[in-house]
Amino acid sequence: MKNAANTLANWIEFPVLLAGLIIAGGLWGFEELMEVARATTPHAFDTEILLAFRQAGQPSDPIGPLWLEGAMRDITSLGSASVLVLITTAAIVYLLLIRRPGAAFLMFVAVAGGQVLSSLLKLGIDRPRPELVSHLVTETSLSFPSGHAMLSAVTYLTLGCMAARFLPGRTTKIYVLALAVLTTLLVGISRIYLGVHWPSDVLAGWCAGFAWAMLCWLAARALQRWRGQSDSV
């Protein structure tokens, strides 16, 4: 009995509890936002925030100086499929070179699975892009959830979690994870600024992305623990 209690205590650690809370919160938030996306008329929450990024009475003119619009286009590219594929491929190759095939496989499953999940969710909800303001970049896919927001969360958070495992000191670990979260947040905000997503699309993308990344991390952790126990038998 005591051994079983010790084993349970070893498994239920603060990072595991935090990951579980993120998954639960992400799923709950996504479900709530899905109701907003399925409504026949845009929610006031969506319209007010989207219009807040435009000059009053000028839905085609974003707020801020001209350079800010260019900066937002640059930031949004950090969540584009081509950039994320490049980053993911580079990370997988590096992990294979340092003989970390398990981590490389986790990276592939997390990002590829996130892409498939995002596409299925878009088809299932079938929400069109917002027409309330002009689009500052061209997009042709469905709107909910934001693929940029979701896949940025999956990719950068997975990279941050893996990098934190090899970095010394708590401060550097927190810095890397904070940088991953900040990049994800900036990408999502850029999608709203550019007028190609409702705010609820971006929030849903973050919810789904963080939940999926944490679920993959927990699965990898459980597999690592199981393999360690098997090797010791």
Image (spheres, rainbow, N blue to C red):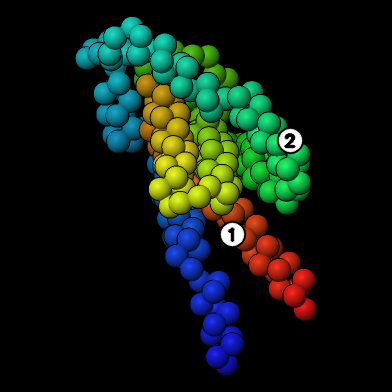
**Residue 19 location (% of width, % of height):** 49, 58
Q: Is residue 90 left or right of residue 3?
A: right
Give above or below for 190 relative to 137. below
Amino acid type at circle 1 is: Leu
How many labels were placed on the picture? 2
Q: Of all residues shown, which one is farthest toward the front?
A: 168
Residue 120 is at least partly visible in this image: no
**What residue is pinned by disc 1?**
218
Marking on residue 93: 2
Label 2: how many Cα within 10 Å (few below 14, some 14–19, many 20+) = some
**Residue 31 location (% of width, % of height):** 46, 51
**Residue at (69% x, 63% y) in the render:** 223
**Residue 120 location (% of width, % of height):** 63, 40
Residue depth check, mark 2 versus mark 1: number of the one nearer the observer: 2
Corner quadrant of residue 113: top right
**Residue 178 location (% of width, % of height):** 41, 42
Disc 2 element? helix
Amino acid type at circle 2 is: Val
**Residue at (29% x, 29% y) in the render:** 49
